Image (cartoon, helix red, strand yellow):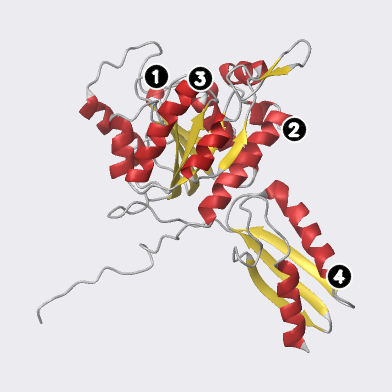
Amino acid sequence: MTDIVKTDVENALKTIIDPNHGLDLVSAKSVKSIAIENNAVTVKIELGYPALSYHEELKTAVEQQLKTLADIGATVEVSTKIISHAVQQALKPQPNIKNIIAVASGKGGVGKSTTAVNLALALAAEGANVGILDADIYGPSIPTMLGLSGYPESRDNKTMMPKIAYNIQTMSIGYLVDAGQAMIWRGPMVTNALQQLLRDTNWDNVDYLIVDLPPGTGDIQLTLSQQIPVSGAIIVTTPQDIALIDAQRGLGMFQKVNVPVLGIVENMSMHICSNCGHSEPIFGTGGGMAMAETNHVDFLGALPLDINIRIQADSGQPTVAADPDSPAAQMYKTIARKATAKLALKAKDFSTRFPNIVIQNT
């Protein structure tokens, strides 16, 4: 009786599709336990990505599905456990950082930094411990977008404490140089600065470090893809053909170095008039989705060209923090859940589970 009922429970759970990655709960290995006692079922669901706003919806869906089994009382628990995922070969995850996610665009001016900041805030709102690293050495914008300034604290004169805003740990070259100072550095200096910002910062148990990359596929991008352990990348583009051409180059770079592209975000997909609310696709339509289909990667979502997103970012109060219940904030949260849900399906990191083997002559 018990075995049959357990099989029935599993079959019922196979009918529930997680919208964040498109798999059913059993195939995604989200079902951690099924306990049956006196015709009462206790199911524990464990997601591999932050999704506090989805937990209750999922719990209700599972409970309703289990009620279709005759004379069964159901208790459903939903939780999240975030682990480290595999990085490039020959690299190991950074200490105190479980996963590094690069946010990239081939072209400047597509709203990549605004997207990166809001995705970081969205992941924090969904329950993750999040950091953001401003990798744009020549044009750091994260301090402005998060309303931060001043030098980071150093407690040992060797390493830096991340500056905190909205419960997000942050580091940027913008904290170390005067505003408006030109960074007249050659490539090697820039790449060394990036690695120091990453490795000399005392990150505190970060689930996801969002790295806001500068546009292009130059020294910074190459250093990140070859020397920094990255679990996945998100490509930001607009629907415009010129932006898509450059975004394709960025996507190709990550594919060449075996960094999984978690998906494509189409920014500025629709302009929303602040007076009448009329929507118009001034940069074209469908470009991001077509690019995703061509490259067999996920389309994570589309974001509007909305003056409020720009105003809030410029004022140091990004949309997800300033107006968390707005449609735009909900879009950012949806994209953040989808990206990390896709990452949760990727290979796990086992580098810390096995001791180093040392051969000695005895």
Tag 2 and tag 4, C-beta contact below 8 Å: no
Across and down, in percent, residue 68 comes to: 86, 70
Considering only order in the chain, which callout, 1 or 3, is on the residue closer to the N terminus? 1
Across and down, in percent, residue 360 comes to: 13, 76
How far apart marks 1 and 4 lie (CA) works out to: 57 Å
Tell me which residue sits at (31%, 69%) in the image: 355
Q: Amino acid at mark 3?
A: Thr
Q: Nearer the viewer, residue 253 or 89?
A: 253
Q: Amino acid at mark 4?
A: Thr
State whether residue 167 appears in this view: no
Q: In the rendered view of the protein, which quadrant contains the C terminus? A: bottom left
Tell me which residue sits at (72%, 80%) in the image: 7
How far apart marks 2 and 3 lie (CA) works out to: 23 Å
Select label 3 or label 1 by which is in front: 1
Q: Amino acid at mark 2?
A: Asp
According to the picture, the residue beneath numbered tag 2 turns out to be 325
Considering only order in the chain, which callout, 4 or 1, is on the residue closer to the N terminus? 4
Considering only order in the chain, which callout, 4 or 2, is on the residue closer to the N terminus? 4
According to the picture, the residue beneath numbered tag 4 turns out to be 68
